[in-house]
Amino acid sequence: MVDFFLYPLYIRSEPAINLAVEDKGIIIKGKIDTLVLKDQFWAMVIESKKAEFSTEAGRGQILAYMLANPHPNRPNYGMISTGGSFIFVKLVNGEPPQYALSKTFITINPGNELYDVLRILKRLTQIALEGID
């Protein structure tokens, strides 16, 4: 069990964010599809896309949301999903911010990679609960 829906974690659907890039005067507004929190700490940002879209379609969007994390001193994690494919994202703020992407996990592959997705979600739950990076 992943435990993302159990205390002390809680889920907020579609919280609005505003991200302003100071040096270029750009303001990005949007709604995060799903945000998993522990207290005020963002445990994970989840961006969902329709099955007919690529997970790549959500990369810029999720990175913009992750940059708006109110706790920039800690790495933050995200997941882009179409329901059948999943990519995990880790963002470390700095000058410049750096991010890494996991491989694409596809549930229809032999061996059903959904189990790998669940293992990663369980590990991210532990990271959020333990307060480790």
Image (cartoon, helix red, strand yellow):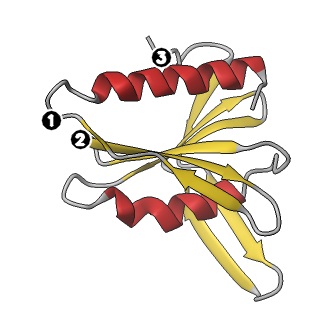
Quadrant (top left, top right, bottom left, bottom right) of the C terminus: top right
Residue visible at 64% across and 18% down in the picture:
126
Quadrant (top left, top right, bottom left, bottom right) of the N terminus: top left
Query: Residue 98's spot in the image, x, y percent?
Result: 68, 60
**Residue of label 2:** 84
Question: Is the Cβ of the residue at disc 1 closer than 8 Å to that at disc 2?
Answer: yes
Residue visible at 80% across and 42% down in the picture:
74
Q: Residues within 10 Å of mark 3 (few under 14, many from 20)?
A: some
> Of label 1 and label 2, which has the lower sequence position?
2
77 vs 2, left or right, is: right
The image quadrant that residue 75 belongs to is top right
Q: Which mark is residue 2?
A: 3
Q: What element carries label 2?
A: loop
Q: Name the one closer to the observer, 40 or 76.
A: 76
Q: How far apart are marks 1 and 3 (CA)?
A: 20 Å
**Mark 1 vs mark 2: in front:** 1
Q: What element carries label 3?
A: loop
**Residue of label 1:** 108
Query: Residue 72's spot in the image, x, y percent?
Result: 81, 51
